[in-house]
Every structure is written in C-alpha cells, then in structure tokens.
C-alpha cells in the first residue's frame, strides 16, 4: 500500500516537473516568487512546488449572436510570440476645429521579450489599448476635420511610431496600425457633401473656361497665320510681276540700243499710250481730248516705226 502511494507521489512529481511548450510560445518560471528562467518551445523540466509558471493576462475577441465583436481577458501561463491583432472599440475624438468624430482602429503587435512583457507592465493588452486611444486623441486633436479624413496614412504611420517607441520597454513590437472607420456627424457630413459638389462644379466651370480660351487662342493663331501667308503670297506675286516687267524693259532697251533708237522716248511713248487707253475706256466718256504733248509722242512713235523698218 505504501509502495503504491509512493509511486503515485512520484508520478505526480514527475508530471509537475515536466512542461511542454508549443512552438512560438514561452513560459516564465518563478522560483519561490523570483524570476528563474524562460522556457523555450519543446520539453522542459522544473522543480515541482518550487518552480511555478507566472500567469499573465491575454486578451481574446469573440462575436455575439448579433455579429458584434467584443473582447474579454483571461489568465494564462503561456506567452504567445505570434503577431496579435487588437480591434479597439469605436471612440469619440475631437479635431482641431472642434468637430467630434468617431474612430476605431486595428493594431498589430508582437511580443519579442516575454520577460519584459510579464514584469514591466501589469496588464499588457489593456495598456496597449489605453496607449493607442490616448495617442490617437492627441494626433487627431492636432488636425482639422478635412485633414483628418484625407490623412489616414499619415496618422497610421505616426501612431505606429509613437506606440512602438512607448511599448518597446514592455517587450512589444508594434508592426502596423490601421484606422478602420472615421464617422462624422450627420450635419457635418451633409455640409461636406455640399462643399464637395460645389468644388466639383467649380472645377468643371474652370475646365470649360480654359477649353474655350484655348480654342479662341487657336482660332486667332490660325487667322493670324492665314493673314501672314496671304500677305506673303501677295508680296511674292508683286515681286514676280516687277521682275517680269523689269526683264521686259531690259530686253526692249537692249533691242532699241542695237538699232540706235532712243529707248527712253520709246518707253515714255508706250506708257503714254497705256494712260490714254485708260482715260478713254470710261463708260460715260464720249469725247477724247488729245493732250498737248501728243505731237511729241507721235513723233516718237514715228521714230519707233522707222526703227523697226531697219
């Protein structure tokens, strides 16, 4: 009988002295109330009744029958080293321009030092939650409403840096922070919708005015270019006409000089005859007067006639 009792006691002692730790978990062991060691994953041995695992608080999330998520905590001797996500309940914060908004956030963190997580803070999940809430209030309180709505990434980054720095002494590494919802009051949201609509209409009018302006500029440039080209064409035509007349006159002068005639008198006579033609070509002209100088011109014509005989 005594042997059986001894065997039972021995079995109990052995069972109490063996602890199996799962992967990505650690156990803090205290001996007579003082920190002794940290058990790593695998098979570990301790001294029964002298060595005792230190309990710590762990937070759990669960959904009720209505689908709402609620959190609760319980004591455990296992410290989970995996990344953990906390879904914080919605809280009211006030922006710099005194607008009350509701924000809820997610925080992803990981315990990297089990000893610090147990001994440096009493209730790690609650401490992280309160730190996140107060830090979020401070950050949003420095921003106006419009800036808060468009600066989620900025808030997430600054919040993560501050939390990671503050929680570092607790053996915690904050990996990521995400703002889920930013809910504004109904009247503020309605005013913002009207403002956004007005801004869109304003931008549309600006774009339309700029388009009309650009079209008018292009039309004016086209007319200007057309006028320039037309003027250049007229100028070129006049130059060509003048060159042709110059060439004709040079040829006539050359021909007259070869016949010993007076080229200047010939040219004057030709121009005079052209002028007389224009004078007499009027529709209402009934009588044509011969100018006084006509006798001189006619003598020149006689001379030209004699020239061509040669």
Image: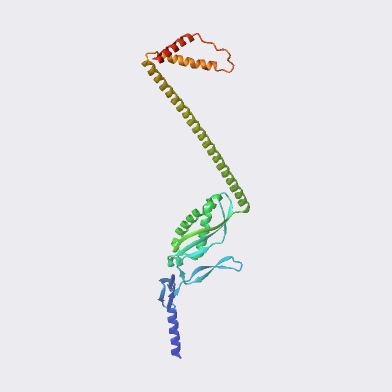
Compared across the picture, whether 271 is left or right of 199 comes to left
The total number of labels drawn is 0
Specify whether residue 256 is in view.
yes
Q: Is residue 86 above or below residue 220?
A: below
Closer-to-camera residue (115/106): 106
Q: Quadrant of the C terminus?
A: top left
Residue 169 in the image: state x and y as whole percent: 44, 61
Residue 214 in the image: state x and y as whole percent: 53, 39
At 45% from the left and 14% from the top, the residue drawn is 268
Q: Quadrant of residue 62?
A: bottom right
Q: Quadrant of residue 32?
A: bottom left
**Rendered image coloring scheme:** rainbow
Q: Residue furthest front?
A: 309
Closer-to-camera residue (88/52): 88
Closer-to-camera residue (253/42): 253
At 52% from the left and 70% from the top, the residue drawn is 74
Specify whether residue 50 is in view.
no
Residue 105 in the image: state x and y as whole percent: 53, 59
């Amino acid at each position: 009988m005594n042997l059986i009792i001894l065997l039972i006691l021995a079995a109990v002692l052995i069972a109490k002295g063996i602890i199996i730790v799962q992967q990505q978990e650690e156990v803090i062991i205290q001996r007579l109330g003082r920190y002794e060691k940290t058990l790593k994953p695998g098979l570990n041995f301790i001294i029964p009744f002298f060595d005792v695992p230190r309990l710590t608080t762990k937070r759990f999330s669960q959904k009720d029958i209505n689908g709402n998520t609620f959190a609760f905590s319980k004591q455990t001797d296992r410290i989970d080293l995996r990344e953990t996500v906390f879904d914080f309940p919605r809280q009211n914060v006030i922006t710099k321009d005194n607008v009350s908004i509701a924000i809820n956030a997610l925080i992803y963190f990981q315990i990297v030092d089990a000893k610090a997580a147990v001994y440096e803070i009493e209730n790690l999940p609650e401490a992280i939650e309160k730190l996140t809430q107060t830090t979020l209030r401070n950050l949003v309180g420095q921003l106006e409403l419009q800036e808060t709505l468009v600066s989620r990434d900025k808030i997430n980054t600054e919040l993560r840096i501050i939390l990671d720095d503050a929680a570092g002494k607790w053996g915690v590494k904050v990996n990521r922070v995400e703002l889920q919802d930013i809910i504004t009051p109904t009247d503020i949201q309605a005013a913002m919708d009207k403002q956004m609509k007005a801004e869109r209409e304003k931008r549309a009018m600006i774009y339309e005015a700029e388009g009309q302006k650009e079209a008018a500029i292009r039309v004016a440039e086209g007319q200007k270019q057309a006028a320039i080209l037309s003027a250049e064409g007229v100028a070129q035509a006049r130059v060509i006409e003048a060159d042709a007349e110059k060439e004709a006159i040079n040829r006539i002068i050359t021909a007259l000089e070869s016949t010993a005639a007076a080229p200047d008198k010939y040219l004057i006579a030709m121009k005079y005859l052209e002028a007389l033609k224009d004078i007499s070509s009027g529709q209402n002209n009934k009588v044509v007067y011969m100018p006084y100088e006509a006798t001189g011109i006619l003598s020149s014509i006689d001379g030209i006639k004699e020239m061509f005989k040669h």
